[in-house]
Amino acid sequence: MVTRADIENMYEKAKTAVVKATNLQQLDQVRVEYLGKKGKITSVLKTLGQLTPEERKEIGQAANKIRQNLESDITDRQEELSREEVAKRLAAESVDISLPGRERVYGHRHLISQVIKEITDIFIGLGYKVAEGPEVELDYYNFKALNTPADHPARSLQDTFYIRKAGVHPADDDIVLRTHTSPVQIRVMKSQEPPVYIIAPGRAFRRDVPDPTHSPMFHQVEGLAVDKGITFGDLKGTLEEFSRQMFGRKSQVRVVAREAFEAGIAEDGPQIRLRPHFFPFTEPSAEVDVRCFACGGVGCRICGSGWLEILGAGMVDPNVLIEVGYNPEEVSGFAFGMGVERIAMLLYGVPDIRMFFENDTRFAEQF
Ligand code: DAH
């Protein structure tokens, strides 16, 4: 016969099992063991009928009490375990907001592209259109049509990379990497009637050994204006306006220039200076200097003389106009070509042209 002590003993064991259950399944096993249909406590309650009325009262009360207690113990433990399980799951899934974030690296235009865009924007503002031509070019467009025949001494200044020699290609012409952007002039004039107002930014190639001021690949911006009555004065005025916008005091927020502006160096008078020169495709021709943006023309470590050479220019040679089918009696024009790297180096104080193409991000991200 079960005694009250037996029941209390049973309860103590059950309580220990409840506490020891580490998950809901184990806890349910404990419940079945004691409170299930065939459970230990249930069995005690089932045998009450065989007892005397006094025993029944005593054992019955004790067993019922313990059943209730155990039920509530199990419920409490159930809640506890559920909470623990949720907490565990959350901990496994949670994001640690104190961890450093993943940095997103944003790119931007290369300095050369920035300067090309600046130059291009100025000429677009003056009514010019942007034209393009191939980097792999026929000798005809690169030299011959620009009044530079095969035996012309000016060719040696622009020795180039020959892709294929004459006689192999159907056009029976040498194929070269263009040595300047000037062939775009010919292509544009051959494809349309005057008036022409274009600029042509792009890559050019020369067989130069790389050094601080030479690179076998570099960039130019070409310009061409052909119309009725174009004069050398138009060329000067256009380049003066370009230089004011590109290098003038108003546009100067650049590092090298700042000191000079703060020193209040005067910068009145013309922005450009022309020196006679020779190019096969222009007559007359000039080399154009811009007033030094750093010292305002006084002379400093950047310019030496107060002036910086930035481009070649001239009046389009009548031979070139005839070559493209224009009538030099009706129209005239000017042309110019500038080196983008040189301008970028001057403006931003870059000491070596090779830095532009080494692709070191520590350099590129400074601009
Ligand atoms: N093509 C010349 C060079 O690369 C630069 C140049 C000079 C372009 C005079 C022109 C020009 O259009 O008129 O050295």
Image (cartoon, rainbow, N blue to C red):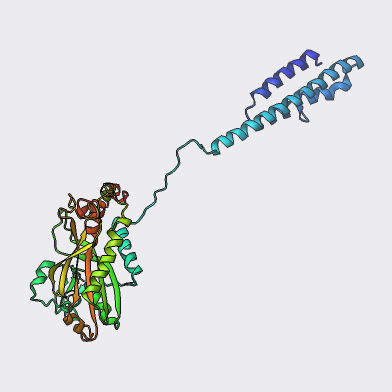
Residue 27: image x %, image y %?
A: 68, 29
Looking at this view, is 277 or 202 the one in front?
Answer: 277
| Quarter of the image that includes the N terminus | top right
Seen as rendered, the residue at the extreme right is 53
Q: Nearer the viewer, residue 172 or 330?
A: 330
* Residue 89 quadrant: top right
Image x and y of residue 248, in percent:
28, 58
Looking at the image, can residue 124 be seen?
A: yes
Front position in the image: 222 or 127: 127
The quarter of the picture where residue 151 lies is: bottom left
Give the residue drawn at x 19%, y 58%: 308
Q: Does residue 147 sit above or below 337 in this rendering?
A: below
Instruction: Find residue 4 and report its image quarter.
Output: top right
Query: Looking at the picture, how far across and down is residue 331, in whole percent?
Result: 24, 83
* Residue drawn at 56 percent across, 35 percent down: 91
Give the total of numbered labels. 0
Residue 216 position (above or below residue 40): below
Q: Position of residue 223 (x, y in %)?
A: 26, 71
Q: Determine whether, in the image, residue 202 is placed left or right of residue 80.
A: left
Residue 356 at least partly seen: no
Which residue is nearer to you in this view: 270 or 111? 270
Ligand 1 position by quadrant: bottom left
Relative side of 153 to 22, left or right = left
Apparent side of residue 270 relative to residue 84 in the rendered image (left or right): left
Vertically, is 52 above or below 207? above
